[in-house]
Image (spheres, rainbow, N blue to C red):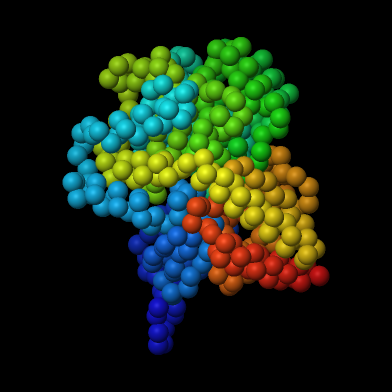
């Protein structure tokens, strides 16, 4: 903790960072541009809590954007990482650990008959789409407003999450050709989906979707929507890609595809499968995946893919995700959603919440959120006030109104009780500002 004269440590670090990093950060949402103020520079974390450069401690509901499902610095994960790192941090060669993690994923997700590891969710989505195009020999992709599949060119047309928080409709630098090959539809709108396939079905290589969008807040899909999407892809010879980078191992051991009983042709995974280290994967039906080199003509490669340290962290994480662990995660997430709703009601502040497994959505508006248009209509100024009031009370929510809240196995009774009290105070301050 910084003492004496001069600016607080977070402020001083941000000033230094802006001199060497674009916007002072390595990922836009960390800049606090959507909520204002000085971003927190994290010094260390353990369990459910993070500590910033000024020594302030927060109950963390960001959890590295959902990756840290066991809690920060989980002892089993740390031990696995230390043991793996002591043998060497990277080889650029095959290892037994990547085979073991791939086998574990296939046991949980039967649709993933073959997979390949990469280092990020963006890389996984980009590669899955390339496989789909190579397999179908078609160009077009169907995606949905508010769903976020990383920052590869085809996916930056009216995407959610950080793009929305930055106030951008898409991204400069994306070619007209990439935009023309991307059909963007309202999430959950079966009529619009059917029209798009009637017009463009023979040219559609794939439809990609977050089965439970978590980048416009959490939006539970309308009943039957994913089934209809599966049917239309089958009818028109397109592949269905489930982007489970967020939902994989978060909404249940079998992901959203197990939860909704819809089997995709291709799946992308990330976050949880790396146990807090950079790891992701894409996989699917054997005959589809085997268009990849060295078996087929679709090229993809990565120096750090299947990194042995990340594989060790992933294996340790999946080993801890037992049925009883998921019961605890569900109960904790339900408690968080309930605390939000009670605090908002007591303060007279309209909120809409949604929950899927161990993630919770919060929108500062009345009425349910079923898609991106509704998500954007939420009161962003009210969220900014709530965010900063929670910071002052020692609770760290996402510095963007378009993100999900996450819980971990480390969020015990004391952490949740502290969060509940902080929510009461924060919503009361928001309600007072509205009066």
Which residue is painted at 59% across and 67% down in the image?
418
* Position in image of residue 142 (x %, y %): 58, 26
Above or below: residue 237 compared with residue 157: above
Judged from this view, the residue extending furthest toward the front is 324
- Residue 198, picture quadrant: top right
Q: Residue at x 55, y 23 (%)?
A: 263
273 relative to 435, above or below: above
**In this picture, residue 190 sits left or right of residue 415:** right
Residue in the picture at 45% in, 60% down: 47
Quadrant of the rendered image containing residue 78:
bottom left
Residue at the image position 55 percent from the left and 29 percent from the top = 257
Q: Nearer the viewer, residue 355 or 185?
A: 355
Vertical placement of residue 41 versus 178, above or below: below
Is residue 215 visible in the rendered image? The answer is no
* Residue 313 percent location from the top left of the image: 34, 46
Closest to the observer, 11 or 174: 11
Q: For the view shown, which residue lies furthest in the bottom direction?
A: 4
**Spot occupied by residue 421 in the image (x, y as percentages of width and height):** 65, 68
Left or right, residue 289 beside residue 379: left
Residue 303 x %, y %: 26, 37
Asked whether the viewer can see residue 227, the reply is yes
Number of on-image labels: 0
Foreground: 333 or 430? 333
Of the 4 image quadrants, the one containing the N terminus is bottom left
Quadrant placement of the C terminus: bottom right
* Left/right of residue 89 with respect to residue 376 in the rendered view: left
Whether residue 263 is situated above or below residue 356 in the rendered picture? above
């Amino acid at each position: 903790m910084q003492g004496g004269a001069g600016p607080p440590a977070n402020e001083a670090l941000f000033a230094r960072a802006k001199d060497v990093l674009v916007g002072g950060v390595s990922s836009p949402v960390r800049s606090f541009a959507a909520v204002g103020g000085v971003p927190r520079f994290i010094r260390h974390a353990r369990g459910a809590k993070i500590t910033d450069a000024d020594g302030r401690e927060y109950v963390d509901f960001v959890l590295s954007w959902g990756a840290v499902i066991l809690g920060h610095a989980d002892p089993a994960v740390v031990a696995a990482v230390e043991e793996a790192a002591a043998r060497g941090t990277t080889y650029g060669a095959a290892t037994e650990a990547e085979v073991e993690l791939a086998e574990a994923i296939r046991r949980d997700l039967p649709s993933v008959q073959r997979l390949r590891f990469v280092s990020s969710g963006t890389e996984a989505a980009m590669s899955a789409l390339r496989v789909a195009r190579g397999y179908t020999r078609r160009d077009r992709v169907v995606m949905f407003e508010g769903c976020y599949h990383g920052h590869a060119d085809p996916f930056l047309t009216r995407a959610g999450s950080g793009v929305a928080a930055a106030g951008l409709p898409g991204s400069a630098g994306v070619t007209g050709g990439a935009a023309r090959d991307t059909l963007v539809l309202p999430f959950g709108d079966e009529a619009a989906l059917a029209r798009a396939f009637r017009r463009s079905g023979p040219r559609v290589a794939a439809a990609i979707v977050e089965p439970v969008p978590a980048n416009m807040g959490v939006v539970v899909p309308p009943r039957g929507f994913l089934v209809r999407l599966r049917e239309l892809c089958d009818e028109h010879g397109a592949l269905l890609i489930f982007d489970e980078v967020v939902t994989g191992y978060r909404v249940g051991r079998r992901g959203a595809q197990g939860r909704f009983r819809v089997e995709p042709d291709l799946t992308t995974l990330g976050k949880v499968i790396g146990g807090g280290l950079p790891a992701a994967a894409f996989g699917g039906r054997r005959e589809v995946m085997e268009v990849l080199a060295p078996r087929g003509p679709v090229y993809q490669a990565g120096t750090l893919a299947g990194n042995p340290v990340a594989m060790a962290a992933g294996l340790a994480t999946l080993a801890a995700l037992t049925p009883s662990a998921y019961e605890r995660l569900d109960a904790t997430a339900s408690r968080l959603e309930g605390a939000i709703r009670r605090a908002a009601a007591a303060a007279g502040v309209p909120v809409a919440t949604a929950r899927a497994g161990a993630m919770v959505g919060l929108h500062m508006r009345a009425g349910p959120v079923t898609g991106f248009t509704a998500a954007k209509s939420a009161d962003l100024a009210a969220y900014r006030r709530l965010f900063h009031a929670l910071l002052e009370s020692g609770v760290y929510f996402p510095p963007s109104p378009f993100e999900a809240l996450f819980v971990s196995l480390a969020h015990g009774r004391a952490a949740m009780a502290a969060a509940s009290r902080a929510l009461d105070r924060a919503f009361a301050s928001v309600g007072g500002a509205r009066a």
